Amino acid sequence: MNWTSTRASTPVLAVVLLAVTGCSSLGRTINPAKYDSMSCTELNSALGESAGEISQTAITRGKVANTSVPRWLLGGSRVKTAVANRETARIDRLKQQQDAIAAARARKCRGSAG
């Protein structure tokens, strides 16, 4: 019985990961102009939030990449690869956002640029 419950949870995990990561990566664009109107404190906070999101996304990507997909689950490996690739793309977008925030902070907050 334990074997069955473990096997049954794999497809559920794959579907949940697809739903969560698919929704979290939609419609995000980087607008560097919005960072120019932020204060140094807001920029520092945004930089920290961005770093946290990158870390969390990398953890999720690692969990997905290390998930063992049973051979009987047709297309399971493709789903796993697609989710990992989506997370990698999200990390790339977050790094671009972080670079834009850091550039705005360097221009605006001379003392805290580093």
Image: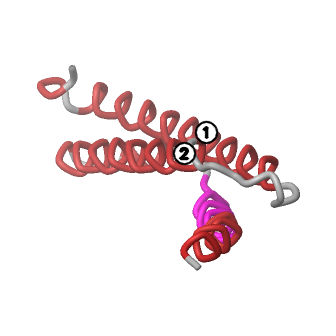
Looking at the rendered image, the disc whose residue lies closer to the viewer, 2 or 1, is 2
Q: Crowding at label 2, few (<14), some or many (≥20) Cα neighbours within 10 Å?
A: many
Q: Which residues are magenta?
A: 15-28
Q: Which residue is mark 1?
A: 88
Residue toward you, 12 or 57: 12
Seen in the picture, residue 16 relative to 80 is either above or below; the reply is below
Seen in the picture, residue 2 relative to 60 is either above or below; the reply is below
Residue 112 % position (x, y)? 15, 28
Residue 29 % position (x, y)? 61, 50
| Amino acid type of the residue tagged 2 in the rendering | Arg
Label 2 secondary element? helix
Question: What residue is shown at x 21% (from left), y 20% (from top)?
Answer: 114
Q: Which residue is mark 2?
A: 61
Mark sitting on residue 58: none
Assess whether mark 1 and mark 2 are in contact (beta carbons under 8 angstroms).
yes
Q: Quadrant where the N terminus lies?
A: bottom right
Q: In the displayed structure, does residue 25 sit left or right of residue 42?
A: right
